[in-house]
Amino acid sequence: MISQLGRGFKALIPDLYRGKVGLDVAEAQHLFDGLDWQGAVKDINASVNWLKANGSKKAGVTGFCMGGALAIASSVLVPNVDATVAFYGVPSSELADPAQAKAPVHAHFGELDNFVGFSDVTAAKP
């Protein structure tokens, strides 16, 4: 865990769903479908700014699936982010163009996965 790496490391997890929790697949899908993506990026921006204002010299964003898409979007849209790591997930073209990344991106995708359009290797390639 990042938070257990030792002194000087902090982990901050913004509550993008404002306290709502998906207790089953249907509820989680409903929350995902209703996510305010631009608002989530603003929350990530505020989190990065808070970390830097509170002693962090650098701040990165990481996430899986939806979080991966937000991590990649953060590399484009969050001015103070220093690096991002995405495990699956590609932001919609309306949100952010990954080719416009201003921070380094380390992305992981499964070549043999059969999920198409959001987290497949073809969608991830520039």
Image (cartoon, rainbow, N blue to C red):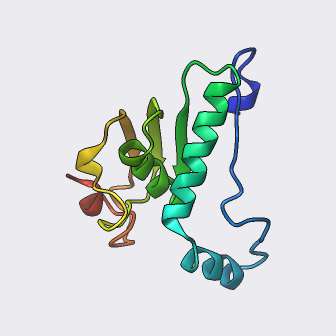
Q: Which residue lies furthest to the top in this view?
A: 7
Above or below, 25 against 2 in this view is: below
Choose between 1 and 45: the one closer to the eye: 45
Res 118 quadrant in image: bottom left
Give the residue displayed 39% in from the left and 55% down from the top.
Answer: 110
Give the residue displayed 48% in from the left and 63% down from the top.
Answer: 38
Q: Position of residue 120 (x, y in %)?
A: 34, 63
Above or below, 40 against 46 in this view is: below
Res 3 quadrant in image: top right
Numbered label tally? 0
Give the residue displayed 61% in from the left and 26% down from the top.
Answer: 52
Q: Where is residue 89 in the image (x, y as percent from the top left)?
A: 43, 59
Q: Where is residue 46 in the image (x, y as percent from the top left)?
A: 61, 44
Residue 101 left/right relative to 17: left
Above or below, 36 against 42 in this view is: below
Give the residue displayed 45% in from the left and 43% down from the top.
Answer: 78
Q: Quadrant of the N terminus?
A: top right
Choose between 38 and 91: the one closer to the eye: 38
Choose between 27 and 97: the one closer to the eye: 97
